[in-house]
Amino acid sequence: MAEKPAALSAQERQQYQERIRRYEEDLAKRREEEERLQQEEEFLRTSLRGSKKLQALEEVRSRHQQQLVDGFVNPNYDEEDEARLEEASKACTLQMKQRQQALDGLGRKPLGVDEVLLCLHNAQHRLKTVDEHHDLSQLAALFQSPRFERALTVHRAVVSVALRNPLPVLTVSSSPAAGLPGVQGLHWDVVSGLRASTQHQPTTQAASEELQQILLSPHFKALMFCHDKVAAQKAEPPKTTTEDDEREYLYERASLYGEESIKIVRLQKSADPL
């Protein structure tokens, strides 16, 4: 049975408050820096728009481009269609950007110990009873323990690696005669190509044989097999159970028993009193 963490002492509580204060100061400095950069970018944009020299250069360049244009007028061209297409493209781009920002905010930035402690500190202002504050003090002691910090560090590293590396994709081999799906078929293609190149290029025979030995080793084959299994699982759509599936499952379970020993009863909830 796991031992409950003890309540925070006065020194630990002071360190906990100091850690949260430093984290809040860092957040405030980061916000100030972001606001300063936004103001500088806005100032540069407005300065470039109001510059008379840049406007004159833009007019000269536009006149030069108009002189270089050579072609014919398309009578079927409609500016409204162009405007609608541009608006649709902007809306699609904005939607993709918002989705990417949501992913960056939720899944691509795992929380650290400081963020967890700050969340715990914010939760203290919403709790009023003594028992709840006692539970929070035990959580704070747990979050500040070295074992929890090491576990959270390992979790952050695993999430970062998983998000940096793409998920396995189930590919298709170029030689269906191999009879192997995914990268196992591609693995067979590479081995066949190496064997063919060894016959035509004897100078690279030693390197080719060494590479074939690596590719045909049991460990490498097992790695390719696991890759295809994971890719196949990720490619499958999530399974959804319907009411008919649940009823069929119940009938299947009921068939294991005799007719006299089990009966299926369906209860329906109604507003009428019993």
Image: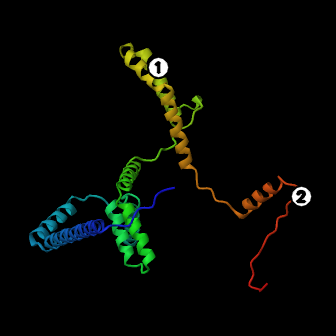
User: Mark 2 and mark 1: span between their CA atoms?
Assistant: 65 Å
Q: Are marks 2 and 1 in contact (CB under 8 Å)?
A: no
Amino acid marked by disc 1: Arg
User: Residue 125: which quarter of the image?
Assistant: bottom left
Q: 251 above or below 216?
A: below
Question: 55 or 45, which is in the foreground?
Answer: 45
The count of marks equals 2
Judge whether 217 appears above or below 145 on screen: above
- Badge nearest the viewer, 2 or 1: 2
Task: Check disc 2 and give the amino acid type.
Answer: Glu
Residue receiving disc 2: 259
Residue at 48% in and 30% down: 220
Q: Position of residue 202 (x, y in %)?
A: 39, 13
| Displayed quadrant of residue 128 | bottom left
Q: Which residue is mark 1?
A: 195
Mark yes or no: residue 268 visible. Answer: yes
Query: Whole-percent x and y of residue 136?
Result: 41, 70
Q: Residue furthest left?
A: 53
Please give the name of the residue rendered at 69% of the width and 62% of the height, measured from the top-left corner.
Answer: 242
Which quarter of the figure has residue 25?
bottom left
Q: Compared to 100, does 40 lie above or below?
A: below
Check disc 2: other Cα within 10 Å, few if <14, some if 14-19, many if 20+: few
First in residue order: circle 2 vs circle 1: 1
